[in-house]
Image (cartoon, helix red, strand yellow):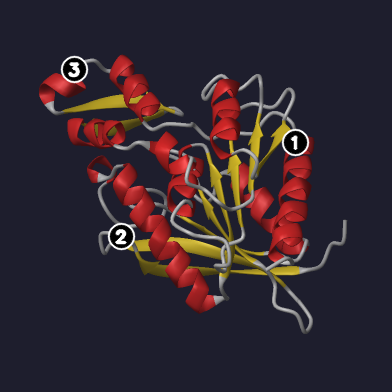
């Protein structure tokens, strides 16, 4: 693995609903004459760009010659907005804005990387790009194959949400307000249909031991995209890739190889 120095800086840009979104760009310090491939990294539900796994992977990708924009969705991390008023539609709109911003700030976006629910957004938005566009690869980490699954989970955590219109759940030791409108939006999307339209090379990384999003979702995604999808099975890894630092090294190297392989073919 070729490792180069990197540099990082903070940015802000308008999200899908006009709120200011916070991001960090991790750049290879010296890319030479050839421009670096550019990736946009979307985080998981209730996470943010500063999740340890996202930071480590983004920095490692920059050291392997890939420029990365990691950003906070509306209402999370350093971004403006009310999380309770967000949903999958707004997540996808935020990602579209991030792609637009990254394209102007550092160059045409070659890859979308998404962790968990951010992976679902990457699949949905990635389905809008055709072969021959600047986007040449989609990468998911522990992504669900549908969005209704999260709605079911949140409703089980607090059955009063559909009745009262708003309720709280505890995720990662923090209390979050969840609206009925959010759950309704999650159920309104046909993500499997969008996944089936993807014509770009897609790398699916998932652990059979994932207790949050089951490995069956990876198998389903593979079946929907096949033959354009590749699967990397992360034996022993947890959903947040927090247990073993070697998992992050392996994941970063796999993503970097995939992006360089397909960005170079454009």
Q: Nearer the viewer, residue 61 or 100?
A: 100
Q: Which residue is more in the foreground, 39 or 202?
A: 202
- N-terminal-most mark, 3 or 2: 2
Residue 160, labelled with which disc? 3
List the residue tagged with mark 1. 247
Specify the farthest residue to the left: 164
Which residue is disc 2 drawn over?
Answer: 16
Structural distance between the alpha carbons of marks 1 and 2: 33 Å
Question: SS at mark 1?
Answer: helix
Count numbered badges in the picture: 3
Q: Residue at x 25, y 59 (%)?
A: 17
Question: Cα distance, mark 1 to mark 3?
Answer: 38 Å
Whole-percent x and y of residue 266?
Answer: 67, 68
Among the two numbered marks 1 and 3 on one chain, the one whose residue lies closer to the N terminus = 3
Local secondary structure at mark 3:
loop
Furthest-bottom residue in this view: 33
Q: Which mark is residue 196?
A: none
Above or below, 33 relative to 160: below
The quarter of the picture where the N terminus appears is: bottom right
């Amino acid at each position: 693995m070729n490792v180069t120095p990197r540099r990082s800086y903070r940015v802000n840009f308008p999200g899908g609903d006009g709120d200011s979104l916070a991001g960090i760009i991790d750049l290879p310090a010296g890319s030479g004459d050839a421009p670096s491939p550019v990736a946009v990294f979307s985080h998981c539900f209730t996470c943010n760009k500063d999740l340890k796994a996202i930071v480590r992977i983004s920095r490692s990708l920059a050291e392997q010659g890939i420029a990365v924009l990691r950003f906070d969705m509306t209402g999370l991390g350093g971004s403006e907005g009310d999380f309770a008023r967000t949903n999958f539609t707004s997540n996808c709109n935020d990602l579209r804005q991030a792609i637009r911003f990254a394209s102007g700030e550092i160059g045409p976006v070659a890859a979308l990387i998404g962790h968990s629910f951010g992976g679902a957004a990457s699949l949905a938005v990635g389905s809008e790009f055709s072969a021959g566009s600047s986007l040449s690869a989609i990468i998911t980490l522990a992504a669900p194959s549908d969005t209704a699954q999260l709605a079911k989970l949140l409703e089980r955590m607090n059955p009063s949400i559909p009745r009262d219109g708003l309720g709280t759940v505890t995720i990662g030791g923090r209390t979050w307000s969840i609206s009925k409108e959010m759950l309704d939006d999650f159920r309104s999307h046909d993500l499997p249909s969008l996944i089936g339209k993807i014509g770009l090379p897609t790398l699916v990384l998932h652990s059979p031991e994932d207790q949050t999003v089951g490995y069956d979702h990876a198998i389903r995604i593979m079946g929907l995209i096949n033959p354009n999808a590749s699967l990397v099975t992360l034996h022993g890894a947890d959903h947040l890739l927090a247990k073993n630092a070697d998992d992050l090294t392996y994941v970063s190297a796999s993503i970097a190889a995939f992006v360089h392989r397909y960005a170079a073919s454009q």
